[in-house]
Amino acid sequence: MHKSNHHTIRMLLQQYHDGLTVSEIVERTEKERRAIDKALVGMPDTYIDRWVEHRKQWTAVWCVVVPPHNCPKPTKKKEMNGRAEFRSLVQ
């Protein structure tokens, strides 16, 4: 059984907000390219942000979604003129 590279890649991409190419990820993690390719495809929170030209070929720049810390659920305040007003639980 082998260790997943997902956490390592996720933490690395969070440090580079402009994203990294697979070659840059391989260089920084010192993991095999094939393992990085496979991990990126299997990670639901990574995506190709853009393509850059490198040696007359297009290379994907990968980024990771950074979820917000908290998104409070709204609650109904009261109805005014037939419309419900909502307010946040956290103020």
Image (spheres, helix red, strand yellow):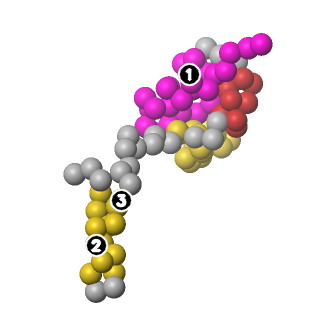
**Crowd band around label 2 with a 10 angstrom C-alpha radius: few (<14), some (14–19), many (20+):** few
Q: Position of residue 4 (x, y in %)?
A: 67, 21
| In this rendering, position of residue 74 left or right of residue 55 | left
**Crowd band around label 1 with a 10 angstrom C-alpha radius: few (<14), some (14–19), many (20+):** few
Q: Position of residue 84 (x, y in %)?
A: 34, 75
Task: Return the mark for residue 74.
Answer: 3
* Residue under label 1: 8
Residue name at image x 58 percent, y 40 percent? 45
Q: CA distance from mark 1 to mark 2?
A: 47 Å
Nearest to the eye among marks 2 and 3: give it: 2
* Residue under label 2: 78
Q: Quadrant of residue 56?
A: top right
Nearest to the eye among marks 3 and 1: give it: 3
The reply to whether callout 1 and callout 2 are in contact (CB within 8 Å) is no
When the figure is inspected, residue 42 is found, relative to residue 23, above or below; the finding is below
Indicate the amino acid at tag 1: Thr
Q: Main secondary structure of the magenta part?
A: helix
Residue name at image x 61 percent, y 14 percent? 30
Mark 1 and mark 2 lie on one chain; the one further toward the N terminus is: 1
Which residue is at the far bottom?
81
Indicate the amino acid at tag 3: Pro
**Residue 3 drawn in magenta:** yes
Is residue 72 visible from the viewing direction of this image? yes
Mark 3 element type: strand
Stretch of the chain drawn in magenta: 1-29
| In this rendering, position of residue 62 left or right of residue 57 | left
Q: Position of residue 34 (x, y in %)?
A: 74, 24
